[in-house]
Amino acid sequence: MKIRTFLTMAAGASALMAIAAAMPAQADDGKLEELKGQGFARVAIANEPPFTAVAADGKVSGAAPDVAREVFKRLGVGDIVASISEYGAMIPGLQAGRHDVITAGLFMKPERCAAVAYSEPILCDAEAFALKKGNPLGLKSYKDIADNPDAKIGAPGGGTEEKLALEAGVPRDRVIVVPDGQSGLKMLQDGRIDVYSLPVLSINDLVSKANDPNIEVVAPVEGAPVYCDGAAFRKGDEALRDAFDVELAKLKESGEFAKIIEPYGFSAAAAMSTTREKLCAAQ
């Protein structure tokens, strides 16, 4: 079957499997062999449930690491070892060789697609706001925040939410960078920010665990796009990325992919309905 035929097929499980069958799983596999010998892959995460999580005993879980762990296992790499990083530091850390891959809900954007070699989509989500009960400032979009000179938003440094706020016209001094979800929630409770923004699933998890009746969620944020992430590899490690994609496609086709991510609240169908090419071009 010619490549042109592949490019005209609808995105979905059958197309993914056709691509997987045509691609050599370990072409130019020096990096993969290195990881096999090492016995693990070093992954960057953000400790943002349900995308990623680190338990008190240090065990790494969450939808993104769980998928990566299974894919690497099928590639002959026994485990993953995670390090927590701010989103803005992940790609520089990957490029500097401190990580082998990013598995952290790092949504595909044109500038990120130019900087790293993404796998096919894994996790998809929309944006959400956590606010004081009753939403006293009536904030339903990033533009609402920009239009209210008193509104301050908290967001992860270097993350999608920070960028969306700035692009909507929120002044830099009203976009407060916070290191993690617990810090963002505390700042909201203390009145240091008026809204804290994360993906829908992350906000719901954070607010549910806080069990604070004075906090509510607005989701999805009006005018904000739906995003998908993928495992992000260094430019130059495309052979490893391609091998990863082959096994990821098999997981999607077999139904194992859905079994891994759907207990966390993610939709396997959403990830299987689009492609890296479309996401990198559209957002």
Image: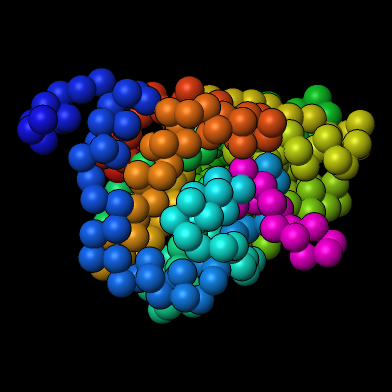
In this rendered view, identify the residue nearer to me: 269 or 204.
269
- The quadrant holding residue 127 is top right
> Which residue lies at the image location 61% right of the left edge and 36% below the top edge?
260
Locate residue 62, reporting x and y percent. Answer: 66, 47
Asked if residue 249 can be seen in this view, the reply is yes
Image quadrant assignment for residue 205:
top right
Q: Is the residue 90 above or below the residue 274 in the image? A: below
Q: State yes or no: residue 3 in magenta.
A: no
Q: Give coordinates of residue 257: x percent, y percent.
A: 53, 34
Of residue 142 and residue 220, the one placed in the foreground of this image is 220
In the image, taking residue 87 as reference, residue 83 lies left or right, namely right
Is any part of residue 183 visible from this angle? no
Name the quarter where the C terminus is drawn: top left
Residue 212 lies, with reference to residue 235, above or below; the image says above
The image shows residue 94, relative to residue 241, as above or below, that is below
Question: Is 94 on the left-hand or right-hand side of 138?
Answer: left
Quarter residue 86 falls in: bottom right
Q: Which of 282/117 is in front?
A: 117
Percent across and percent down for residue 240 are 34, 60
Q: Residue at x 26, y 38 (%)?
A: 21
Please give the range of residues in magenta.
Answer: 51-65
| Residue at horizontal 21 percent and vertical 40 percent from the top | 22
Residue 55 magenta-highlighted: yes
Image colouring: rainbow
Q: The N terminus appears in which quarter of the rendering?
A: top left
